[in-house]
Amino acid sequence: MKSQASTKPSKTPKAPAARAPSPAPTTAPNSVLAAALPAKAKPATEAGPGVTLPSNTRALLASRSLEVAKTGAYTGEKALPKQIAALLMDGVRKEAISDETTLSGVLANYIDEGMVEVYSIRNPAGGAVDTWLRFTCGDTEVGYIFTGNTLKAIVGDQDIQPF
């Protein structure tokens, strides 16, 4: 027969050992956005300056924390503004998924119907405005998101991937 254990503690519990305070960070945050976020909060996708993006375009379009506005839709080389054409070609080169090297070739052979939609993405709390080039390839939503002239993210099948 087993003896029953006593319910009285045999020793008083020890207090946890005191720790030295953590040293302060020696470097500044990599971005203004990182400095504005609480220490444990992490953005879904952060790739360079500009706005913090969700992981896919459905969430981006439905976002309540970002202002997403369609600023234009262009079909064909003549309709596409030069700045947007330059961004599109930069995205195609950096993504390296198409062998097309000319704007006319990209619009005719890579982008469905040669149509590119342009959106602005802005955080109402401040910061840079991003430009989203949205189009389809083989009925799949793809595109590029830029901060200024810098490619920030590539959209593939609605997923936003930092570049």
Image: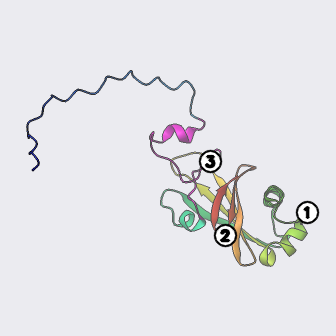
Element at label 1: loop
Frontmost residue, 159 versus 58: 159
Give the mark nearest the N terminus, 3 or 2. Answer: 3
Element at label 2: loop
Q: Quadrant of residue 140?
A: bottom right
Contact? badges 2 and 1 (CB < 8 Å) = no
Residue type for callout 1: Thr
Element at label 3: loop
Residue type for callout 2: Asp
Q: Main secondary structure of the magenta part?
A: loop
The outermost residue toward the front is 1
**On the rendered structure, is 10 left or right of 86?**
left
* Residue behind mark 1: 101
Q: Quadrant of residue 13?
A: top left
Frontmost residue, 64 versus 38: 38
Residues at marks 2 and 1, CA–CA distance in whole angstroms: 22 Å
Frontmost residue, 111 versus 163: 163
The residue located at (11%, 42%) in the rendering is: 5
Q: Is residue 12 above or below residue 85?
A: above
Q: Which mark is residue 33?
A: none
Question: How far across and down, in percent of the image, does residue 159 sit?
Answer: 63, 64
Contact? badges 3 and 2 (CB < 8 Å) = no
Give the mark nearest the N terminus, 2 or 1. Answer: 1
* Residue behind mark 2: 157
Residue type for callout 3: Gly
* Residue behind mark 3: 50
Q: Is residue 102 above or below residue 11?
A: below
Q: What is the magenta range?
A: 30-56
